[in-house]
Image: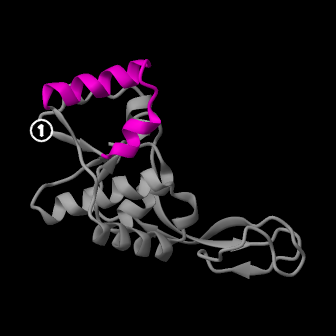
């Protein structure tokens, strides 16, 4: 589960199976908030487990995020959530990422990890991004490190380079 799942009001106690999240999600949620209470209660009941993914899975996620152009738009927490889902799948589980974050959904789709959203419609097509300068129109690779154009200094934006149909493994709210 991503932070957005807790913020949207998701209660892990309603799951039919065990839920998982990463320590960074716990760090992002205010302890005295309703989301924080839900998270702590689920952990104390054993319904939610907090795990840190292994480094090899983080590397794999970063590679997939770079491929679709979302690497710059994923937080460290997002990367960990995706990596934990990959690791759980490798361990024989069937992870379903609960998130309203479009970049997480896009990368999850790239890696064939099912996801669902709570408060948003969720992505309908996987996007491959390109970064560009709105002033001089120069295009850059999605993983270009600078935030500004190397020709004119304008702040870069991003736009979809290509839209791909979602694979059938993703559970989407329609």
Work out whether residue 81 or residue 53 is closer to the camera in this orientation and state it: 53
Q: Where is residue 71 in the image (x, y as percent from the top left)?
A: 52, 66
Residue at 26% x, 64% y: name it.
54
Q: Does the magenta stretch include residue 66?
A: no
Q: Main secondary structure of the magenta part?
A: helix
- Report which quarter residue 26 is drawn in: top left
Residue located 37% across and 72% down the image = 59
User: How far across and how far down the image is residue 5, in percent?
Assistant: 38, 36
Quick one: quadrant of the N terminus?
top left
Q: Does the magenta stretch include residue 40?
A: yes
54 relative to 67, above or below: above
At horizontal 13% and vertical 31% (from top left) the residue drawn is 46
**Vertical comparison of 2 with 71: above or below:** above
Residue named by callout 1: 17
- Which stretch did the figure color magenta? 22-46
State whether residue 90 is above or below residue 124.
below
**Residue 117 point in image, percent of width and height:** 39, 41
* Colour setup of the view: one colour
**Which residue appears at 49% of the width and 74% of the height?**
66
Outermost residue to the left:
92
Left or right: 26 as drawn, with respect to 89: right
Q: Residues within 10 Å of mark 1 (few under 14, many from 20)?
A: few
Quarter occupied by the C terminus: top left
Image-based side of 132 in relation to 58, left or right = right
Q: Quadrant location of residue 98?
A: top left
Quick one: 63 or 43, which is closer to the camera?
Answer: 43
Q: As displayed, is residue 16 above or below residue 106?
A: above
Asked if one can make out residue 62 in the rendered structure from this viewpoint, the answer is: yes
Query: Can residue 2 be seen in this snapshot?
Result: no
Residue 47 horizontal/vertical position (percent):
15, 32
Secondary structure, mark 1, is loop
């Amino acid at each position: 589960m991503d932070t957005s799942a807790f913020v949207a009001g998701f209660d892990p106690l309603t799951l039919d199976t065990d839920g998982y999240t990463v320590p960074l999600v716990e760090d992002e949620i205010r302890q005295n908030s309703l989301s924080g209470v839900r998270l702590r209660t689920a952990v104390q009941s054993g319904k939610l487990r907090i795990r840190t993914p292994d480094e090899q899975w983080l590397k794999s996620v970063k590679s997939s995020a770079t491929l679709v152009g979302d690497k710059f738009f994923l937080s460290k927490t997002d990367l960990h959530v995706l990596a934990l889902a990959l690791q759980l799948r490798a361990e024989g589980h069937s992870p379903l990422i609960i998130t309203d974050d479009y970049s997480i959904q896009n990368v999850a789709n790239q890696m064939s990890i099912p996801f669902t959203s709570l408060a948003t419609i969720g992505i309908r097509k996987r996007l491959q991004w390109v970064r560009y300068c709105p002033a001089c129109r120069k295009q850059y690779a999605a993983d270009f490190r600078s935030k500004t154009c190397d020709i004119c200094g304008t702040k870069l934006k991003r736009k979809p380079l290509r839209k791909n149909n979602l694979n059938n493994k993703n559970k989407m709210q329609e």
